[in-house]
Image: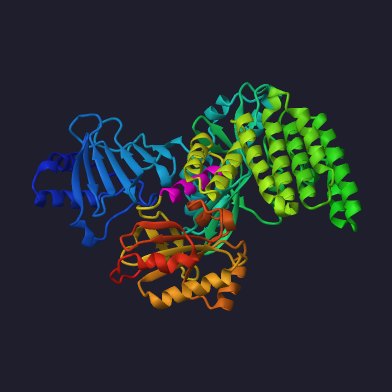
């Protein structure tokens, strides 16, 4: 086991010498830059190239010192926070932003807390025995929990999985009723027993990389339901995507529950396959819906569920639109009856399913009266304070569907339709400031503000999403948009693997010496071929320009076909997910094309360029020295 580094005395000398001569300071800079985080390999931070170390500077700050790079960006900070004459905080930065911190909280010259910040996440681990291994989590978001689960599976680390599995004491803290409590006890026991067996099957390689969390939205199991003493926040039927040997693999991780500031798992992770997807869905704790396969073992499917399954199959096989419409109405009637006869989270689930089913049918043109049905459903919920989030769920889907249909039919009146959409979004945010769907409403409004050139309003909304709804799926995208809007004059924090070059990746933030063009595109966007021709012309004229295309097609085959047909030779990046993929999320990309230009000094000079403007933008930049990306 790797022993943690004991920093205290050495780096106290560094602090004490901050006012000494240049030669001594340079030695201390070199010493400081050799320091590495105790949680090695779990954070990316900036380390200058060897030839730039001599250009770095040492600054005295309150309680410690700071090392800055030749561009004035912070690289490291070493602080004596408790005033005992020894370093107790070792801070690491990426592109001038703090991303990680080792902390000696008890003042014995050894780190015992490890924290991640900003673009590196929110994790906070505690190392009680100071051996360099996290013993427990103090803060762990649901996304970071899914990554921990995947990495425990990839590395075969049973102790790592045990740290994120709910403990008996934590389970008691939830205050659930007896039935749910017993079910969760059994799931935790089974997870412990089965994890080793899953490891033996080696579902992931040691080099597997977590890509993204995949869950709908958090839910709350309300106090008073089935004997629960407190509200319990949870996710059901969660999966995550892992890049395994160059291919994306889906891992089922089941039910996740919040315990204070830490999310915990109850289930043993396993690969998702066509054969087990129904069983995974049937393993829920809070929303118990039996699949066909699960029912064979546990008894017959309820009459309502059986009828629902039959209706779904008849809709698939229907021959005419009118037949589908009639079946959709029957389906809505059945779900509404199931909701009326249920209570608690079961009722909420049937209402959400009803809303999703109606809006999906409306968009497909098979439920002409669907929007009116949604309005009646909303009216039945909006006056009850306990149904406030359900009312918000229904209303947001109703107004989103109405906007989509209205825009499709708008013609010359599209501006009126859009203005109504903006008003609807503003009213929704005002009426439901705390509803889970408000994060998405704010994101939509921020995007529209940005499209209108109101960047300040957009930035304010993006930042509010991140602070108010940190666990929402909208928060990651909003955080990326904040990074993009604030990027001019700074290095660009964008790291991604290069398509077709196994093991190679680009880190735009570390590139200097050439002009970098980051071009987000899809094969289906207007004038895609013309844009590519303009980029070819630019590359033919300027050998100091390097282009990285970031393709956001949903299917990599579509990108590959376009590249071949148009003879595109520059670097490309593609990850699964299209506009919701990791590269798009990283910088909050909402519209295509988006072009970002980084100057030869490594900082962004234009975050919203047009391809047609690239040549003029490049002309204004100094001719850089040749350098390989």
Q: Position of residue 296 (x, y in %)?
A: 80, 46
Which residue appears at 66% of the width and 38% of the height?
Answer: 424
- Considering the whole magenta stretch, tell me its main secondary structure: helix
Q: Nearer the viewer, residue 608 or 35?
A: 608
Going by the image, does 118 lie left or right of 316?
A: left
Q: Which picture quadrant has residue 302? A: top right
Report whether residue 451 is seen. yes
Q: Position of residue 493 (x, y in %)?
A: 40, 54
Q: Relative to 404, is 598 above or below?
A: below
Q: Which picture quadrant has residue 540? A: bottom left
Q: What range is drawn magenta here?
A: 473-486
Is 380 covered by the magenta stretch? no
Q: Relative to 446, is 183 above or below?
A: above
Q: Nearer the viewer, residue 140 or 25?
A: 25
Q: Nearer the viewer, residue 384 or 139?
A: 384
Q: What colour scheme governs how the chains and residues are painted in the rendered image of this protein? A: rainbow
Q: Nearer the viewer, residue 596 or 614?
A: 614
Q: Position of residue 435 (x, y in %)?
A: 62, 33
């Amino acid at each position: 086991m790797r022993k943690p580094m004991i920093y205290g005395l050495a780096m106290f000398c560094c602090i004490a010498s901050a006012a000494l001569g240049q030669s001594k300071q340079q030695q201390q800079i070199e010493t400081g830059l050799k320091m590495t985080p105790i949680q090695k390999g779990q954070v990316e931070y900036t380390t200058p190239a060897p030839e730039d170390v001599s250009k770095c500077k040492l600054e005295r700050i309150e309680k410690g010192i700071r090392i800055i790079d030749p561009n004035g960006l912070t690289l490291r900070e070493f602080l004596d926070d408790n005033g005992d004459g020894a370093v107790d905080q070792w801070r690491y930065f990426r592109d001038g932003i703090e991303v990680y911190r080792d902390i000696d909280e008890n003042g014995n010259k050894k780190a015992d807390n490890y924290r991640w910040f900003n673009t590196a996440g929110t994790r906070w681990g505690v190392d009680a025995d100071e051996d360099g291994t996290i013993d427990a989590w103090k803060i762990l978001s649901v996304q970071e929990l899914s990554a921990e689960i995947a990495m425990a599976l990839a590395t075969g680390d049973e102790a790592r999985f045990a740290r994120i599995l709910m403990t008996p004491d934590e389970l008691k803290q939830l205050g659930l009723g007896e039935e749910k409590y017993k079910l969760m006890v059994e799931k935790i026991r089974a997870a412990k027993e089965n994890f080793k067996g899953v490891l033996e099957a080696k579902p992931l390689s040691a080099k597997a990389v977590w890509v993204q969390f995949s869950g709908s939205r958090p839910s709350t199991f309300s106090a008073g339901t089935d004997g629960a003493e407190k509200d319990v926040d949870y996710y059901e039927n969660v999966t995550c995507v892992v890049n395994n040997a160059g291919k994306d693999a889906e891992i089922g991780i089941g039910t996740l529950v919040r315990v204070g500031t830490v999310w915990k798992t109850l289930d043993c992770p396993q690969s998702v396959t066509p054969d087990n997807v129904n069983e995974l869905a049937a393993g829920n704790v809070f929303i118990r819906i039996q699949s066909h396969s699960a029912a064979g073992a546990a008894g017959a499917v309820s009459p309502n569920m059986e009828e629902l399954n039959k209706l779904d199959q008849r809709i698939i096989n229907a021959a005419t639109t009118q037949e589908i419409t009639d079946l959709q109405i029957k389906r809505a009637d059945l779900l509404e009856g199931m909701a009326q006869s249920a209570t608690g989270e079961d009722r909420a689930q049937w209402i959400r399913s009803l809303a999703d089913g109606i809006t999906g049918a409306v968009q497909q043109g098979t439920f002409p009266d669907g929007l009116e049905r949604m309005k009646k459903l909303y009216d039945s919920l909006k006056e009850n304070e306990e149904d406030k989030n359900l009312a918000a769920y229904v209303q947001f889907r109703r107004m989103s569907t109405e906007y989509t249909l209205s825009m499709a039919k708008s013609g010359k009146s599209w501006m009126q339709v859009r203005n109504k959409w903006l008003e609807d979004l503003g009213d929704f945010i005002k009426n439901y400031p705390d509803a889970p769907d408000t994060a998405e409403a704010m994101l939509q409004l921020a995007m529209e503000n940005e499209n209108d050139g109101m960047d300040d309003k957009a930035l304010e909304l993006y930042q509010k999403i991140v602070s108010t709804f940190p666990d929402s799926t909208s928060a990651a995208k909003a955080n990326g948009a904040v990074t993009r809007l604030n990027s001019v004059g700074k290095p660009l924090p964008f790291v991604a693997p290069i398509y077709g070059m196994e093991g190679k990746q680009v880190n735009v933030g570390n590139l200097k010496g050439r002009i970098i063009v980051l071009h987000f595109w899809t094969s289906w966007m207007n004038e895609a071929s013309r844009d590519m021709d303009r980029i070819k012309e630019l590359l033919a004229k300027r050998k100091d320009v390097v282009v990285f295309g970031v393709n956001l097609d949903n299917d990599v085959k579509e990108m590959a076909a376009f590249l071949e047909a148009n003879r595109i030779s520059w670097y490309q990046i593609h990850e699964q997910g299209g506009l919701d993929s990791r590269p798009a999320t990283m910088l909050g990309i909402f519209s295509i094309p988006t072009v970002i230009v980084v100057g030869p000094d490594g900082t962004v000079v234009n975050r919203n360029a047009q391809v047609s403007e690239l040549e003029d933008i490049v002309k204004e930049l100094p001719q850089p020295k040749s350098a390989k990306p």
